[in-house]
Image (spheres, rainbow, N blue to C red):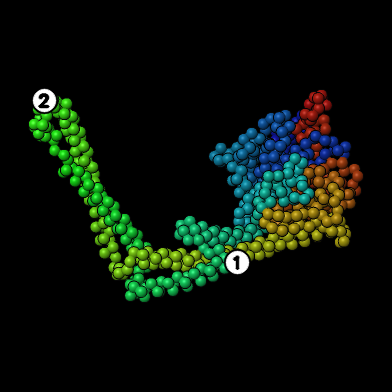
Amino acid sequence: MLVEVQCDKFISDGQIREPIRFHTGLNTVLGDNNGSNSIGKSTFLMILDFIFGGSDYVKKCVDVQENIKEHTINFTFEFGGYQYHFSRNTIDYNKVVRCDEKYNPLIEEKPLSLQEYGDFLCKNYGLSAEGITWRGAVARFIRVYKRDTLDEERPLRSSKDEKASDVIKRYMQLFNRYHAVEAQINQATAAEDEKEAFRKSSLQYNHVRAAKTTKEKEANETRIAVLEQREKEMAESSNQGLLDLDSLTARRLSELMEQLINYRRQRARIQTQLNSIRRDMTEQKKGFKRTFTDLERFFPNEEFRTLEEIEHFHQKLAKILAEEFREAEKDLSTTYVLLNNEIVRLKNEITEIKNVPNVSQAILKEFAQITTELHNLREANKNFDELESLKKVAADYAETRDAVIHDQLLAIETTVNQAMREISLKILKDATHMPPILRLEKLNKYTFNTPNDGGTGAQYRGLITFDLANMTAGPIPFVIHDSVLLKNIERKVFAEIIKVYEAQKSHGKQVFMAYDTLDSYDEKTRLLIESNAVLRLSPRGNELFGWAWNKENKDEAGK
């Protein structure tokens, strides 16, 4: 437990305060009977939160950080008769330093991260449930002004941005009830993931979706019967030859034969083009110059020079055309050879497939279509059955998960509600008075209220009762309650709450409370509070830090 806190910034009447020492049971931080404000009561409780691993003291007590500047909080825990000394600085606040008894840092010891420090506290406070964390266990029971833990309808919330699902998970871990739930959640999630993976893969990768409904499956079965009959008829008409082909082979044969026909058509077209080009190349007209003698005989006085020039041009053109013919003939010949090679390859591949029935391409194509459709329909129905089976498994696991969640939540709810009933009876002395009620409805939903009593005092009394019940029913080692929770509670009820606080001594647990203005309470209550005072604060030099920075006049501030 926490036994000491010290800081050289804690000042009283100009002197550094002696270390503040704590004990089991009630530990009170007392203000004066005037109810003076801004003397450090809530700030000190924030420092306790800082000691217990929180960071709100640095982040939310901005005025303290601005006026006091950097400072170090020193503190000591005692576990099993052995004392552990630490310090935590307000600037380098993400680590906790191991110290000797005079709070000198142990050089040989590596500073602890907040996670490591939390693990240390969990171990020594006996919080050993699987998955539990230190702040997850205790943060929600530190109820101090400026912290997000004063919502009387959300007693399990430790911060405003904490999700309800995380809140309830951590609360279940506190009672060691989440492990069983987590195992069922993981099993149900795995079953749901398997179902979804099958559904997606059957569509995306097999390209055959599952039948959507039983009606669609039945329609598939009807269609399967029709196709099977047609398959049988085709097989009989081909002397059973088609029966030797599976759907993939039939489809492949159909594709090969279709390619063979296509290539033969292309080869025939290329052959025609080749023949035409070769004919043009061999039937070119003879040179025009050879006929000039005959023309001279009929036209002896004519000049044929122009005709000779034209003939020369024709010869050049013929040469160019001949070159183009040769190139075209070469390309077509190459294409012809390639097509011929492909035709030979396709014939060989078809020949290599055994038991090829002697049927037409049309029959083979229809048979391939039938076998493909049959395959798809059977796969669709098979996938439907598989998906339905996976759905049932997922639903069964989900039902088991929900039942386990309900049972575990109900067990915690029953235990805490019974403890709140018993504590309410102690502090109210009235068995007819309705105690607060916790309802853990789901993993992400809960309610808390004090029935038929919406008054401020009753609602905050409900929070106090809830915390005390968790100390009784669970492993919570301490609670911290600011005066804002207690101010509106009627005096006789307040007196009984103080008794319950002090009774935690018998369980080795601690209650840290801030309060002031005790004049209106009975002597027994006053004595109980004052005898457990660990720190007394008042204005004019006896504030927590020895002065009040909200005063314009430094003399009035206590400096």
Q: Nearer the viewer, residue 115 or 345?
A: 345
Q: Amino acid at mark 2?
A: Asn
Q: Residue at x 29, y 52 (%)?
A: 266
Is residue 7 visible in the rendered image? The answer is yes
Residue 500 x %, y %? 80, 54
Q: Residue at x 56, y 60 (%)?
A: 192
Residue 112 x %, y %? 59, 42
Q: Above or below — where is 378 with respect to 291?
A: below
Query: Which of the 4 image quadrants contains residue 555?
Result: top right
Q: Nearer the viewer, mark 2 or mark 1?
A: 2
Q: Residue at x 34, y 64 (%)?
A: 361
Q: Nearer the viewer, residue 434 or 380?
A: 380
Per the image, the residue denoted by label 1 is 396
Per the image, the residue denoted by label 2 is 301
Secondary structure under badge 1? helix
Q: Amino acid at mark 1?
A: Asp
